[in-house]
Amino acid sequence: MSGHSTYEPKTGFERWLDMRLPLIRLGWDSMIDYPTPKNLNYWWTFGGILAVCLGIQIVTGVVLAMHYVPHVDHAFASVERIMRDVNYGWLVRYMHANGASMFFIAVYIHIVRGLYYGSYKAPREVLWILGCIIYLLMMATAFMGYVLPWGQMSFHGAVVITNLFGALPVVGEAITTWLWGGFAVDNPTLNRFFSLHFLLPFMIAGVVGLHIWALHVPGNNNPTGVNVKSKADTVPFHPYYTVKDGFAIVVFLILFATFVFYNPNALGHADNYIPGNPLVTPAHIVPEWYFLPFYAILRAVPDKLGGVILMFGAIAVLFVLPWLDTSKVRSMRYRPMGKLYFLIFLLACLVLGYCGAKLPDDPVIPGLSTFTLIDADLNSFVWLSRFATLYYFGYFLVVLPLLGLIEKPLPQPESISTPVLSHPGAAPAGATAAPEMKG
């Protein structure tokens, strides 16, 4: 809990502004004196990293929008002109393209941390749901942005994904027609996607503001999952976590810069450097890497409507997760069985991502069916996707509800301070550090 404000205006202008629009007080209470659990590890730095990623995407996106032409006859050429003729256009474009991947890397780590440490449990349900809304908006924004270069993968990816909405009963055809702006993916589609791609990041920024607000009501979760019981369990956000987050952001930006300057196309697809052609279909239409697990779930179901329902259900189940997990213990640190099933869940997600990048009928292990009794169909990526999909949904709908009822958790510490102060490297309470030896 943030508690009462400790901000005291020091100048006449600050007192005047504080009585009318307490912006300085808000910043002080949110980023300076905000009491934060003192045992947060580096997994908690990805919230700040995501804020930086969002800022980079908005700034570079606005600059690119100044030069981009949302027309099917000029979109591809305008992107190439940005790369060749606009001053530092190559840098802005590569920052924006790779920034999307960095954004998703950070958000997936952020989600995994929340799942492992139980950050979705009461009283943080609204905080978690707002995070899921941000993730959903990110997916929509990324998909529409991927269409804008109007390369081969952009065009045919738009055709495949928008056609999926047509499988929905009653409203499917109307949604597809609205997305297309006509009866096929064409210039009206590109215009709509450009408009929405420009708008949605600002919607994300608004929901991020609500997300931070919802965080400051119950306060941060922590690795132990134990609630803050006293002021001794916390430290001010500044300078402890501003320095820690700042260091993590710099390390992440080094990774970001490595892709931008040394391998900017590593996370993209070569076919997107070919102008979109409705008459030539790529041999293998695949989405960006961060959509591959959901693409594998879609292909795992032979029925089109069933695949669409499961694909969207994989995201929808996250919204109800706080009520599916019946365990009274937040952190997986104290849940041995929960930790094991969680690691299998992570493996299933990685398997789904790998399967999404492969052709569904390709053998998982070449030659296996020749030397064993295993049927060739079972040795395919589509069947591996089905097994991983079954566990993905089973983890949320079966494992977590039952595990909370049968699992015997390990003893939890009484407070955050207990494990911190009893650490082998920590000094006993009241002890002073030994003087540093001079060499």
Image (cartoon, rainbow, N blue to C red):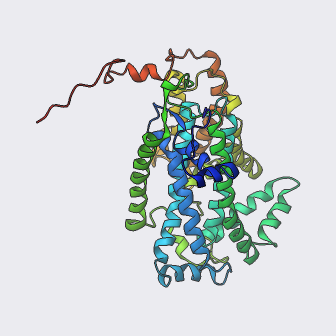
Q: Is residue 28 above or below residue 343?
A: below
Residue pushed farthest front?
12
How many numbered callouts? 0
Q: Is residue 389 above or below residue 196?
A: above
Asked whether the viewer can see residue 60, the reply is yes
Name the residue located 75 percent from the left edge and 47 percent from the top edge: 309
Using the image as rendered, state which of residue 425 and residue 154 is in the foreground.
Answer: 425
Name the residue located 82 percent from the left edge and 61 percent from the top edge: 175
Where does the image place residue 429, in percent across and percent down from the top left?
37, 18
Name the residue located 55 percent from the left edge and 25 percent from the top edge: 228
Using the image as rendered, state which of residue 398 and residue 32 is in the foreground.
Answer: 32
Asked whether the viewer can see residue 360, the reply is no
State which quarter of the image contains the C terminus: top left
Using the image as rendered, state which of residue 68 and residue 215 is in the foreground.
Answer: 215
State which quarter of the image contains the N terminus: top right
Residue pushed farthest right?
170
Name the residue located 70 percent from the left edge and 39 percent from the top edge: 319
Residue pushed farthest left?
439
Task: Quadrant for residue 141, please give it.
Answer: bottom right
Where does the image place residue 334, in percent across and percent down from the top left?
51, 21
Where does the image place residue 206, in percent across and percent down from the top left?
68, 54
Left or right: 54 in relation to 326? left
Where does the image place residue 379, in percent across and percent down from the top left?
53, 44
Task: Quadrant for residue 145, please give it.
Answer: bottom right
Task: Quadrant for residue 392, please give it.
Answer: top right
